[in-house]
Image: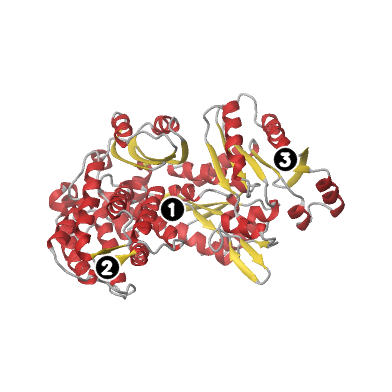
Amino acid sequence: MDTTYLDGTGLRGALITASEYVQRHRADLNRINVFPVPDGDTGTNLALTVGSIAEQLRRNTDSSLGGVARAAANAGIMGARGNCGMILSHFLLGFADAVGDRPRLAVTEFGQVLRSATEHVYKALEKPVEGTMITIMRAIADEAERLQHSDFVVLFERLLVKAREALASTPELLPVLKTRGVVDAGAKGFVHILEGIAGYLSGDPLVALDETPEYDAEPAVFAAAEADYSAEEQYRFCTEALVRGDALPTQDTVRAWLRERGDSLVVIRSGDMLKVHVHTDEPEAVFGYLRGFGRLASHKAEDMHAQHAVAERAAAGHMTLARRPVSVVTDTACDLPDEVVRAHGMHLVPLNLIFENQVLRDRLDISADEFVEQLKKGAHPSTSQPTPAAFMEGFRRAAEEGENVIAILLSSALSGTYASAQVAARQRADGEVPVHLFDSKAGSLLQGLLALKASELGELGWEPARIIAELERVRKQSGFFIVLDTFERALASGRVGRGKAWLGSLLDIKPVLDIDAAGKLLPIDRVRGRKNALPKMLEILERKVPRGAKKVRFGIMQVAAPEMLEPVTAEIRKRYGNVDIMTSAGTPIIGTHAGEGAWGIAYLVED
């Protein structure tokens, strides 16, 4: 590549390589994480954030620098986790704003863009703290403006020298780092990003670059565990939320409200997205406040006391890796939106679609939108469950992050997915992280809402047995039902006879199917004509949701019927108030069996 300028292709490759480089150093970053709180998750949070960016960019084909920069910033906002992820997203947003719609950037212009990105971060933070990631940003902006090189490879070699010098100085700027004998984890993570970019630009990204230096002597096995949590943090819950809406408040407005209820504030407002990070004792109050501005697309509240306890156990066992209390695995039949999966760090195991002789992994090799296009062209794929090997890989990745793994899986009465997971779980060796399987007796967004519930309880520090028991209790009073617009796919799957399908199509009858308590899919009603489907579905919903239920979440899934999301959402809110409603396009696995035009409602009763 020509390294005298940077275009969209170059930026995309550089950021994807940087993401891979950060993944390699996740455990080390967790180990030295003592600021702003010693919860041992900076490496995980940064890895998930850059992973979200890389995932989006791998699907991006823009050749313009401005287009790729904007895509990276938006993906960063949607996938940002923790202080480090939020600050990085602010940096990328400032970078994209400075680049504008320019197709490419010369080396001589790069310094000013870095300066603008850095200033954007400083202005956005409630209390900029030197000795963290922002110190590295400021140092490389200073160096880029000072240097006059015509080649990006040379420039990044020099920027890395300056970044590593700034990293080594972080303990002098933050006493807690000096006390523990470590550099700042977020700052080191940002240096790893620069290392990955430099490797890509040099044309040899897989070569092991010089490691970033530790501060002074070798730090403790687990510095995060040795830090005094109570001395560092007065609030308990690391709270994050992503809101989407057309009339969002300003960053300053939201920050002023949050300031009275917590600290470690980072707020990002970009277009129709508002992302919030705050440490607080009132996460539900934060979520309630944000619901007033639009759709709460994702939200989480992690118990930092529980996280620190995990780090202490790791240190006591002389382990070099910190884990969350629970890491959640689910399969792609769950229909959860990407932003929810990313927010909670879930691990997805893909089911498979078979197009004649081609096997595609659901959500990885084919998206919901791409699948709909295939449906409209007359494609008739079949499906198959994940292999035990796919589950073993999913469990392995989840075990790197959790003391326990809980897998919430597609109903065993509908698929062999659960049996495949059982085979994989039995093959795990003694002493490995325990894997707990839960048959959701569900699919689509009911399975997804149960997986989300498991993630939330794990973030609060619940033990696996208690989480499984709570899922079983909630599942018994929850459900999912779906109306089909056509008999075609039901006929292909053998669930409807040819005679009934012919008569139903002739009379414009739409069948309504329900997942019962055993996890089986059964017809429960029918409606004539598309316009009558919504009243019938709402009538069924009112019969199913227990009267007086105070804590209910809903999900709306559609297959090539996005026009149903708004009216169904409005009708549910009219009946149940400003409740959480998750919406998603049905993944290809669900769409294969439901067919074009199908839509369904999931409800999770938590009382």
User: Within 10 angstroms of label 3, few (less than 14), some, or many (20 or more) residues?
Assistant: some
Q: Is residue 595 above or below residue 303?
A: below
- Can residue 462 be seen at all in this image of the molecule? yes
Mark before the other along the chain sequence, 2 or 3:
2
Camera-side residue of 229 and 81: 81
Residue 112 occupies quadrant: bottom left
Mark before the other along the chain sequence, 2 or 1:
2
Q: Residue at x 62, y 48 (%)?
A: 444
Q: Secondary structure at mark 2?
A: strand
Q: Residue 403 has which mark? A: 1
User: Within 10 angstroms of label 1, few (less than 14), some, or many (20 or more) residues?
Assistant: many
Name of the residue lying farthest toward the top: 548
Type of amino acid under label 2: Tyr
Spatial separation of the CA atoms under disc 2 and disc 3: 55 Å
Residue under circle 2? Answer: 5
Residue under circle 3? Answer: 530
Which quadrant: the N terminus? bottom left
Q: Secondary structure at mark 1?
A: strand
Judged left or right of residue 566, residue 8 is left
Name of the residue lying farthest toward the front: 102
Q: Secondary structure at mark 3?
A: helix
Camera-side residue of 184 and 359: 359
Spatial separation of the CA atoms under disc 2 and disc 1: 46 Å
- Residue 125 in the image: state x and y as whole percent: 25, 42
Type of amino acid under label 1: Glu
- Contact, mark 2 vs mark 1 (Cβ under 8 Å): no
- Residue 2 in the image: state x and y as whole percent: 29, 74
Mark before the other along the chain sequence, 3 or 1:
1
